[in-house]
Amino acid sequence: MRWRQLLAEGAEVLAAAGIDSPQVDARLLAEHVAGTHLLLAPDPTEQQAGEVRGLIARRARRIPLQHLTGEMFFRSLTLPATPGVFICRPETELLVDEAISEIERRREHLTIVDLCTGSGAIALAIAAETGRAVTAVEIDPVPARAAAESARALGLPVTVEIADALTWGEDGSVDLLTCNPPYVPRGELPPEVQADPPRALWGGGDDGLEIPLIIIERAARLLAPGGLALIEHAESQGPALISRAAELGLDAQTLPDLAGRPRFCRARAAV
């Protein structure tokens, strides 16, 4: 048995199960078992072939790839992926770009807060790439512990607070606020997304806007003069968030994601 034969077999199984990227997923699972790039690995042993087939079968049942490999990637970071912790998505990496641009523009000491931090991916990436201290706020103790453990393991200046993002903090105390809140509208989701904790997904109401609107209201209170909030949202939610931000005295605009879809609210407090 060669790796390419095992990959072809696995990709066929995954394609039949409706996986969008069967070849990629089969390769990643095989490399997880091999412990290296397949070009560097000797032919698979019978035990390795059995392990790959077992993982392929579980992936075909729509178990998230990250839960099978136990890791997820966000910018330069490799983070543990476990049930009960939201799986970070590549779209959110653009929010970190905006945060870093703000830090580089202002240069002075900033109080940086990441609300609804989940795995801590946003806070950890900002700290890793800028060296700045970040406070990460998460109400669920399971992802909060995961974020704190990642911060310790990576040696990053991220402090995790177990608290409700909808009530946390003192008015006028934050210079840079980031947040990827629950915002998914009511409806059906792919099985892999349903594996994420419900608290991290559903935004409330048919349009999913209940929590995002509260977050923009909290941002308006938390931001110091000239402070900036960066909030991820569903592509249908931009107009409502921009309108509410304007009512609250924030200068707001919508930014696109990697596919050009409206995905982020960028809102600045008046000086």
Image: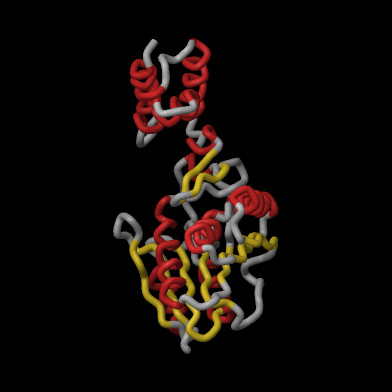
Side (left or right) of 88 relative to 218 = left
The residue lying toward the viewer, choosing from 193 and 161, is 161
Residue shown at 69% from the left, 64% from the top: 163
Up-down relation of residue 89 to residue 256 (above or below): above
Side (left or right) of 8 relative to 144 = left
Applied colour scheme: secondary structure
Q: Can you say which quadrant of the picture contains the N terminus?
A: top left
Residue shown at 46% from the left, 24% from the top: 56
Determine the image quadrant of residue 199: bottom right
Up-down relation of residue 251 to residue 114 (above or below): below
Figure disc tally: 0
Answer yes or no: is residue 217 visible. no
Q: Position of residue 26 (x, y in %)?
A: 40, 27
The residue lying toward the viewer, choosing from 33 and 215, is 33
Residue shown at 62% from the left, 82% from the top: 171
Q: Position of residue 167 (x, y in %)?
A: 66, 72
Up-down relation of residue 41 to residue 230 (above or below): above
Answer yes or no: is residue 214 visible. yes
Residue lying at the far bottom of the rendered structure: 271
